[in-house]
Image: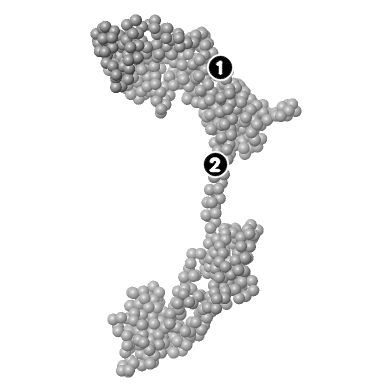
């Protein structure tokens, strides 16, 4: 029998009447004593149950108890005088009756003031004794406990309801019986496990365990119960339908007045969602660790290859060997688009073959594969339909350096983690090749000079020359951190302000500024986007030597190293700007200029007075701040006027800048 059933039967056996009323003050429950003494029936109204002389007084105190939410006591005259303790529970009430001796004035009136219906009965008057939770536990309730007080029915009902409605599963197991059988479960336990009370009571709670239950957690619970100590574990349990869930189990012993353990109370909480979240967090941490290790390993090797390689081919060969040696890859190759033939040509490749026999059966590059064409056409990472190959475009600063293709031994090799690694690797390889090609053009002795013609008004210098009749000549560019560009052009044949106005109407110009005007010529600064034509040339490994525009036609001279892929730049520019033509392709030697040659060249350009003015200004600290010497002091040392000194100094500075900027 469960403790709630035992308690309810105890209330039934109380010698004093107990009645429960609903919000309409109709009887919803009465024990045997109430039925026998007052002839109370379930469903009766308060006015149908008690004499009219007592009904008004009872109703007044019932309303008071409901409003205050606190128990009140009242003395009423029924067949005998009774002290009534009224316990509110929302709009419902429990009334406990106990006979008392009549008052000394025999008037039948209550001896508690109506103005204070919460007052306890006077001293000497029998009153209810409340159950004290600090000394009386749920596991110790008995019929004798309940009979000791008319408060017990309401208080026990409150505690029973609180336990039954608790959001966690609650069980009570007997410690006085073999195998600790369950004697009570609440409704939340039934909802959590799917087991009804009739299938659970009398059994040990181990029926929730199953195939994936951790035996160590079970052992910790058993050891704690044997030692009569509290314990908390998390383990896999199984519902009645076989579904597994994570259960947080807290067990505590309940002791009687003699200190002996009589019961164990258990609390079960479904923590499946938390466990899933923890598992997801661990998996993500492991994936991150994998990515870091994988990226660091491959990028470390690529970096080493870049440092040691002297050519682009050496970089590509080292990358292919490293990838082919990495599980689960069996082939890696780098290909480059041949625009003239419309095909992809493999440049470097490597396989995982370790001997001649393996080499004979080793896979070979397939440049006609759809995944290769798609990656080059879209500029995006692609995986083949069968999942065995991935193609990574090698692009850096608008320059295309082909495609890296890796072939795996299994179709699930290119999961999201591996794709992150390969994308990072592709960017690193492309940047390394771009840096190598850029450096190579700067130091190359043999170069290819390419001359191009443009007539597309989408290029601002073409549009401005057509609109204003001006002639524009390129003077140089400076790259900003965000990738945008500031380009300087000298302008003749048109007013500088007119050129600025025309440039502001061009879509590829973010802004234009007139910097200076002198002798009918102007210097104009153009703010250009990151994909400006000068940046495109640089991305393909070229160096812009000159740009000029007049009458709606622009011409550009670009310098490439001897082995550069000039065709890829030409094809790129043709795809962007209609009417682009390749006018000339010239091979020539570019002699390197030593420091001494640079000084000699500059010295030839300077007059004696200009060189002297420049040298005295530098040595004398004229370019420092604050200046330790004035222009007048230096002019005096040269025996010339201050204005003449500044004229010589400015001429020397102009020639020095021209040699530096125009001679690069």
What residue did someone put label 2 on? Answer: 288
Asked where in the image residue 48 lies, by quadrant, the reply is bottom left
The N terminus lies in quadrant = bottom right
**x and y percentages locating residue 226 in the rendered image:** 62, 69
Q: Nearer the viewer, residue 307 or 378?
A: 307
Q: Residue at x 53, y 65 (%)?
A: 267
- At 58% from the left and 18% from the top, the residue drawn is 341
Quickly name the residue at label 1: 340
Number of numbered discs overlaid on the protein picture: 2
Task: Tell me which residue sits at (47%, 10%) in the image.
Answer: 593
Lower position in the chain sequence, tag 2 or tag 1 = 2
Could you tell whether 372 is left or right of 154 in the image?
A: right
Q: Residue furthest right?
A: 357
Q: Position of residue 452 (x, y in %)?
A: 45, 13
Judge whether 283 appears above or below 340 on screen.
Answer: below
Left or right? Give the position of 139 relative to 506: right
Alpha carbons under labels 2 and 1: distance apart: 44 Å
Which residue is nearer to you in this view: 409 or 147? 147
Q: Where is residue 573 drawn, in percent x and y?
A: 46, 19
Residue at 39 percent across and 25 percent down: it is 480
> Mark 2 and 1 residues: CB-CB less than 8 Å, in contact?
no
């Amino acid at each position: 029998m469960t403790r709630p059933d035992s308690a309810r039967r105890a209330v039934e056996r109380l010698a004093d009447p107990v009645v429960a009323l609903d919000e309409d003050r109709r009887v919803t429950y009465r024990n045997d004593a109430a039925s026998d003494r007052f002839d109370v029936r379930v469903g009766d109204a308060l006015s149908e149950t008690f004499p009219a002389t007592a009904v008004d007084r009872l109703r007044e105190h019932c309303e008071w108890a409901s409003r205050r939410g606190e128990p009140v006591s009242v003395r009423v005259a029924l067949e005998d005088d009774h002290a009534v303790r009224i316990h509110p529970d929302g709009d419902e009430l429990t009334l406990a009756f106990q006979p008392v001796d009549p008052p000394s004035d025999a008037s039948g009136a209550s001896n508690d003031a109506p103005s204070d219906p919460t007052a306890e009965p006077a001293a000497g008057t029998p009153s209810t004794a409340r159950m004290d939770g600090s000394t009386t536990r749920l596991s110790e309730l008995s019929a004798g406990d309940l009979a000791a007080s008319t408060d017990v029915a309401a208080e026990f009902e409150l505690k029973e309801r609180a336990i039954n409605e608790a959001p966690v599963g609650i069980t009570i197991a007997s410690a006085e019986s073999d195998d600790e059988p369950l004697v009570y479960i609440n409704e939340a336990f039934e909802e959590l496990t799917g087991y009804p009370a009739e299938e659970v009571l009398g059994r040990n709670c181990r029926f929730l365990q199953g195939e994936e239950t951790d035996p160590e957690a079970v052992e910790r619970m058993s050891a704690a119960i044997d030692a009569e100590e509290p314990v908390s574990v998390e383990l896999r349990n199984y519902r009645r339908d076989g579904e597994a869930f994570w259960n947080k189990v807290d067990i505590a012993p309940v002791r009687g007045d003699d200190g002996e353990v009589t019961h164990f109370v258990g609390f079960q909480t479904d923590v499946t969602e938390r466990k899933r979240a923890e598992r997801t967090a661990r998996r993500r941490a492991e994936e991150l660790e994998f990515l870091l290790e994988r990226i660091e390993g491959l990028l470390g090797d690529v970096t080493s290859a870049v440092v040691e390689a002297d050519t682009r081919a050496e970089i590509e060969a080292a990358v292919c060997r490293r990838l082919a040696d990495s599980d689960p890859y069996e082939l890696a190759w780098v290909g480059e688009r041949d625009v003239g033939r419309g095909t992809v040509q493999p440049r470097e490749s490597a396989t995982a073959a370790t001997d001649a026999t393996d080499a004979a059966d080793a896979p070979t590059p397939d440049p006609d594969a759809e995944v290769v064409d798609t990656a080059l056409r879209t500029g995006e990472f692609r995986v083949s339909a069968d999942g065995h190959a991935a193609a990574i475009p090698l692009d850096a600063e608008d320059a295309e350096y082909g495609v890296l293709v890796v072939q795996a031994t299994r179709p699930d090799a290119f999961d999201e983690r591996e794709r992150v690694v390969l994308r990072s690797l592709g960017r690193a390889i492309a940047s390394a090749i771009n840096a190598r090609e850029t450096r190579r053009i700067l130091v190359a002795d043999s170069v290819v000079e390419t001359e191009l013609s443009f007539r597309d008004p989408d290029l601002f210098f073409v549009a401005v020359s057509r609109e204003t009749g001006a002639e524009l000549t390129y003077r140089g560019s400076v790259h900003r951190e965000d990738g945008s560009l500031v380009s300087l052009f000298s302008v003749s044949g048109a007013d500088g302000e007119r050129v600025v106005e025309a440039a502001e109407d061009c879509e590829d110009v973010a802004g234009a500024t007139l910097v200076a005007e002198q002798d009918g010529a102007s210097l104009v600064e153009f703010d250009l986007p990151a994909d400006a034509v000068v940046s495109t040339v640089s991305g393909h490994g070229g160096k812009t030597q000159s740009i000029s525009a007049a009458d709606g036609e622009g011409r550009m001279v670009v310098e490439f190293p001897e082995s550069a892929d000039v065709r890829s730049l030409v094809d790129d520019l043709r795809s962007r700007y209609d009417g682009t033509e390749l006018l000339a392709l010239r091979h020539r030697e570019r002699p390197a200029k030593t420091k001494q040659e640079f000084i000699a060249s500059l010295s030839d350009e300077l007059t004696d007075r200009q060189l002297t003015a420049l040298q005295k200004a530098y040595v004398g600290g004229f370019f420092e701040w604050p200046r330790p010497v004035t222009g007048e002091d230096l002019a005096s040392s040269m025996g010339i006027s201050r204005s003449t000194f500044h004229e010589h100094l400015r001429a020397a500075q102009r020639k020095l800048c021209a040699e530096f900027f125009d001679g690069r």
